[in-house]
Amino acid sequence: MLTLETVSGMAGVGKTAVAVDTARTLAPRFPAGQVFLDLRGHSPSQEPLSPGTALAMLLRLFGAPADSIPVRLDELIALWRTTIADRRAVIVLDDAAGPDQVAPLLPGNSPCLTIITSRRHLTGLPHAVPLALDVLPTDDAITLFRSFAGAARTQDITETARIVRLCGHLPLAIELVANRFRSRPSWSLTTLGERLARSPGPLGEIRNADQEILRAFSLSYRTLDATQRTTFRCLGLHPGPDFTAESAAALLDLPHKETERLIESLLECHLLREPAPDRYRFHDLLGEYARMLALAEDSAREREQALERLIAWYLRNAEQADRVAYPRRIRLAPNGAQELPALSHMPNTHDARAWFAAEYGNLLAVERHARTHDSRPSAARLAHALAGFLESECHWQDAIDILQYAADHWSRTGDQPAQCHALLCLSSNHANTGRYAQAVEAGERALEIARATGDREAEWEAYRILGVIHWHIGENETAVVMHQRAFAIGIATGNVLNQARSRNNTAISLLALGELERALDHFQNAISGFRSAGDEAGVIRTLNNVGDLYAHRGDYVQARKTFEELLPLTESTGNAYTQAMVRTNLAANLAETGEIDRALALHHRALTEFRILGDRKSQATAYNGLGEAYFKEGSVDASIENHLKALDIARDIRTSQEVTRALRGLGQSELASGRLEAAAEHLEAAIAAANRANARDEEARAQAILAEVRATTGDAMEAKELLRRAISTLRGLNDREANRLHKLLTRIDHGETDF
């Protein structure tokens, strides 16, 4: 049963501290763990987390892959509630903007404890127990002060009580004063108390949260020297969630060592925090105060120049990280005008990708700032530098707006090479998330520009992407043509890796067309090419496809062996999509060999991963796999339910191979349950869809099941004709299935109708 607490109160009253301490105290009762999520309801520099983004972060905290997020809110909510349904955990949702933000995040009928903090009183949340915080009692205020100031110098409880009284018993004021005291070892408690009592500052005159916070900050600010004040104001301009000394140096236009010393001086004053080693951030209200001072005390040109330096720094380093992390990716030529020093801690692929991961939130914030503050070319180039990371780490939803903006920007400026590259990235992103019409449009426009500008590398990429899209939607003959054209470019340019990728992609579509021997030849050549190019991930992907070929032949034992050997290799690569796809393929083969329970578990796990990735086509694949496994288990209703889900998705995104498979599965289940008319209708639709896509083996399988329907209804002549067509198609492709159908034909010839 859901347990929900809302903690509200004035700024600085200690809502977060209470929530975190409660979670820690109750930890033994909630063995599934404790998580904390800042909803940024009142962040001065960032929008509040959307429910979708917040749900994605919660899923990651509970073990979902960190390199992906779902696309649709309803799927996120369902996945979150499924994930948390049986877990006893404490979830702290900090700084909520309002009920609409947090309602989708509640874990439903779960044994979790959810604690929500907000500066507002939250209404409309079912089962919520409200807790309004006030200032601390004297004893607690003293304890809080001593915990920050240190017990050794705070033995005089009477003088300490006087200090906390002068602080109004407000936790933030107490913390600020205690930390200041700790940084002044020559001071006594009497010295601090006297300064607070005679100070013109606000501590004894607090009236509301805003006045108290601003005056407390002003008191700290006035203790800084001129250089520290400039630093404080300028750092407040950073649009991201945190910063490093390197990015701060760019913003301040100072050497790295001097920047580090200034940051350390602000840390001493507790005007900055260091939540992780060498990463710094403001308290949200301190950051707001710093920006307010910058607006009041610095000129518009000074602020603009600081932010221009910061944007240029992130762009230069993102471009370097992109080249180190993804050396084989096609990209724009570097902008020679940007001569800023690059990061020194990026010697290899691992470090470059780690830099992207650490700076991801800042990169998004800087791109957004550049896009909306007259730095549009930099925003477009930053989008291009980010595209490889967004693609490989499956941040597909975050990429949508960024890549679309870049394509639109270069279209407006008339820079065709840049527009071509942006369209290629956009087309691939659309394909990843099932927006195939938009993907084709962007890909064809990129191809047109690549041809016009003579960019052979971009032309190869356009053909590759278009070929993959046509495979997704079942147009495999067109896909083969696209990949063959890409292969010809790979030959002409001598690019062994591109040749291998084209061969692998060609083979995938040939496999869908039932040309197994040609497909195997291409797969084998692709593996050799990938090995020559040193691309182990390409080898793994191709071996997965070879396993799929074995399954098409009906050699489920060899297919299963291939997938089981591959699975640990894919898990070591860290690519969530490849892992999920191998699990799906292994599950399908386990179902064929009778290990239904294990098959169902793998299908469900893969489905969850595909949801997180936002890959709708693969979700349809997983639902169809579940439908087939449930049918083999004898759970006909569950089979129908999953095939219907697959059909809805597949029709929505126009992927004919999963439409055909879903229709065939529905027909088979309806035949088993005696709904012969519905079975025939679905099977006829499956045959038509497979015929349009020239998917010969899928058409044959649907024909064989329809033959059983016709034989059951007494139409032996049509049943035999359907079986003959299916046997003719499958002979040489899947001899085991062809032999089974031949036996069925013999039974019909003998007048049998009970199948």
Image: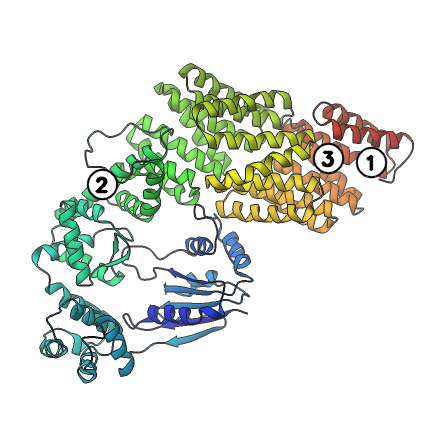
Which coloring applies here?
rainbow
Q: Amino acid at mark 1?
A: Arg
User: Where is the C terminus found, in terms of image quarters?
Assistant: top right
Q: Residue furthest top?
A: 492
Point out residue 411 in the picture as x, y percentages from the top left corner. 33, 31
Mark 1 or 2 closer to N-term?
2
Where residue 710 is drawn, which disc sits there?
Answer: 1
Mark 2 or 3 closer to N-term?
2
Where residue 313 is drawn, which disc sits there?
Answer: 2
Mark 3 or 1 closer to N-term?
3
Where residue 268 is drawn, which disc sits there?
Answer: none
Work out whether 320 lies above or below 198.
Answer: above
Q: Characterize the local packing of mark 1: few (<14), some (14-19) or many (20 or more) Cα atoms within 10 angstroms.
A: many
Res. 663 visible in picture = yes
Cα separation, mark 3 vs mark 1, equals 12 Å
Q: Characterize the local packing of mark 3: few (<14), some (14-19) or many (20 or more) Cα atoms within 10 angstroms.
A: some
Residue picked out by circle 3? 684
Q: Is residue 401 left or right of residue 720?
A: left
Residue at (43, 42) in percent of width and height: 396
Point out residue 583 in the picture as x, y percentages from the top left corner. 58, 42
Helix, strand or loop at mark 2: helix
Q: Nearer the viewer, residue 468 or 715?
A: 468
Point out residue 34 in the picture as x, y percentages from the top left corner. 43, 63
Helix, strand or loop at mark 1: helix
Q: Amino acid at mark 3?
A: Glu
Residue at (55, 70) in percent of width and height: 1
Q: Residue furthest bottom?
A: 158
Point out residue 125 in the picture as x, y percentages from the top left corner. 46, 69
